Amino acid sequence: MDNLAARFEALGRLVPIPYPWDVAEYVRRVADHRGRPITLCPIDAGSLSGTGCGTGSGLWIAREDDDVIMYGADTEWHADHIIAHEIGHMLLDHGTSPTESPSSPKDLPLHALMPSLSLESIQSVLRRQDYGSERERAAETFADMVMVEATLPRRTPSKFRSTFFKARHR
């Protein structure tokens, strides 16, 4: 967790979380940081059920030149959390490891969900299918941290807090 907290802090400097919270602005900042567009694609909350996507809530599709996040949610808060989870996979480099075993696009009903999506352009598909995996836990923790940070009131940095907490956590 300490390693993930340090990574989250570093990523927060690279891609600041907007205050006040605005998911579209955060997605734009992530896209700018990664140098490739991200398309958000809301779908019916039950559309991903049965595709191995855990609760059927989110799917990150990395294509040749852009990324697509498909998400289903009944509330805006849940949608924001799902989007932050998929962004967590992106920023934590979960789609770039040689040990990554991306889902086969042919195993997913992608054409039915998004008919304009060319299966030939897909490089990898990451979906919520193994909630026990280290990567899923890291992406979920990342999303939790983003959403907590997004809801905290803006505070000015305090030398006292910084010094006090650094001394206590050594």
Image (tube, rainbow, N blue to C red):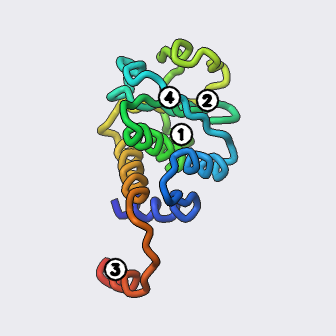
Q: Nearer the viewer, mark 4 or mark 3?
A: 4
Amino acid type at mark 4: Pro
How far apart in space, not on screen, are marks 3 and 1 (Cα)? Answer: 34 Å
- Residue at horizontal 40 percent and vertical 52 percent from the top: 147
The x, y position of residue 91, in whole percent, is: 53, 49
Residue on which disc 4 sits = 42
- Residue at horizontal 56 percent and vertical 44 percent from the top: 24
Earlier along the polypeptide chain: callout 2 or callout 3? 2
Q: Nearer the viewer, mark 4 or mark 1?
A: 4
Amino acid type at mark 2: Gln
Q: Report crowding for label 2: few under 14, some 14 to 19, many 20 or more residues within 10 A (C-alpha).
A: some
Q: Report crowding for label 4: few under 14, some 14 to 19, many 20 or more residues within 10 A (C-alpha).
A: some
How far apart in space, not on screen, are marks 4 and 2 (Cα)? Answer: 21 Å
Q: Quadrant of the N terminus?
A: bottom left
Proximity of marks 2 and 1: CB atoms separated by less than 8 Å: yes
- Residue at horizontal 64 percent and vertical 53 percent from the top: 33
- Residue at horizontal 43 percent and vertical 56 percent from the top: 150
Q: Quadrant of the C terminus?
A: bottom left
Given residues 40 and 7, the one toward you in this image is 40
Q: Secondary structure at mark 1?
A: loop
Q: Report crowding for label 1: few under 14, some 14 to 19, many 20 or more residues within 10 A (C-alpha).
A: many
Residue on which disc 1 sits = 95
Amino acid type at mark 3: Phe
Amino acid type at mark 1: Gly
